[in-house]
Image (spheres, helix red, strand yellow):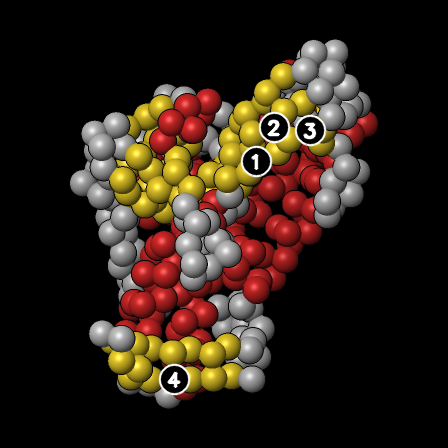
Amino acid sequence: MLRAFPEVARKALDLRSLGQRVTEVIGGRGTHPVSAVAGGLAAPLDGERHAALVRLAEQAVPLAAALVDSSRDALLAKRDLLLSLPLETHYLGTVKDGALDLYDGDLRLRAPDGSVFDFPEDDWGKYFEEETTSRSYAKPVYFRHPDGRRVSCRVGALARLNCADRIGTPLAQAELERFREVGGFPCHQTVMYHYARLVEMLHAAERLAELARDPEILSPDVRGIPQGKPRRATAHVEAPRGVLVHDYDVDERGIVTRANLVVATQHNILAINDTLGLSAERYLDRGDAELLNGIEFGIRCYDPCLSCATHRLGEMRLEVTVRRGGEVVRTARRV
């Protein structure tokens, strides 16, 4: 899309550059910041870095709003693709008093019929079930519903918007309403993950501006785990890919001695497999190049990391075998 819409690409690069500068202010460098420790940050913000953060935050909102406007138009111009991979699933995301939140609040399961079940983050172990399979190194995660059902969930940007009743910043709330006009609620259109990321990006810019002006951001109390006492520390956050759970044992020095991570792609892997089937069916009668690109297109919906892994369009080595009832009906290769 960025090749076809250079104005979108330019605005995206501008916002990415600003985001890297924000990370440098907070974490010392734009990639792999060095300020995080178990339970918080290594050191609080000082006055000079705080002033720089405020300046950048004030620039972020209009940049994000302009990018959303351009990107929305580009997506809606391809409405046939935007609504091409419908997949009805459950969704898992974080809410605080019903509003979208990325790092605080309860976890919410949204069923396809719109009903919800909320539970505290510390209770994740009661409901998440990891499973090994002989077909993949990935360990799918199922959700054990209190009513006894065992369901799979999608996580990430689309899931977060489906789980939230509303968004607590005005520009993002207005964009959420546009989003739901296009995709419905809950939205089961897989390609709408891309639109959902735009809504979240705008919300993140607005929240950055709010938090940068909050005096509490200068608090010297930046450690969440008391030193000198071993403990188990469990928390979750909404990573770009979706719900991420970290479960640690921490010694008296704050050193992690045991770690268990339940990552977002474990939730999404079953839906990704179903999406591959939908993509293969959609492009089955096309040429090899279209079929292979269609498969990549379905994968790219789910998260930025997988998107980068397939992003060398037309160059990634790929072999596809399509079976129906166990019978091979089509193969395609790119080497």
User: Which element is circle 1 on?
Assistant: strand
Observer able to see residue 88: yes
Label 4 to label 2, Cα distance in Å?
45 Å
Give the alpha-carbon distance from disc 1 to disc 4, as whole Å: 38 Å
Looking at this view, name the residue that lies furthest to the front: 134
The amino acid at mark 3 is: Thr
Disc 1 crowd rating (10 Å Cα; few below 14, some 14-19, many 20+) is: few
Most foreground residue, 102 or 90: 90
Q: Sequence-wise, which precedes: disc 4 or disc 2?
A: 2
Between disc 1 and disc 4, the foreground one is 1
Q: Secondary structure at mark 3?
A: strand
Q: How many neighbours does mark 3 have within 10 angstroms: few (below 14), some (14-19), or many (20 or more)? A: few
Residue 200 shown left or right of residue 231 in the figure: left
Q: CA distance from mark 3 to mark 1?
A: 10 Å
* Mark nearer the N terminus (2 vs 1): 2
Vertical comparison of 288 with 202: above or below? below
Distance Cα–Cα, label 3 vs label 2: 7 Å
Which label sits on residue 331?
Answer: 4
Residue found farthest to the left: 113
Along the viewing direction, whichever of 196 and 308 lies nearer the viewer: 308
- The picture quadrant where one finds residue 216 is top right
Q: Which residue is mark 3?
A: 257
Badge 2 is on which residue?
248
Determine whether label 3 and label 1 are within 8 Å by CB.
no
Q: Are marks 2 and 1 in contact (CB under 8 Å)?
A: yes
In three-dimensional space, the C-alpha distance between marks 2 and 1, rounded to whole angstroms, equals 6 Å
Q: Residues within 10 Å of mark 4 (few under 14, many from 20)?
A: some
Kindly check if marks 4 and 2 are in contact, taking CB atoms under 8 A apart as contact: no
Quadrant (top left, top right, bottom left, bottom right) of the C terminus: bottom right
Residue 260: image tag: 1
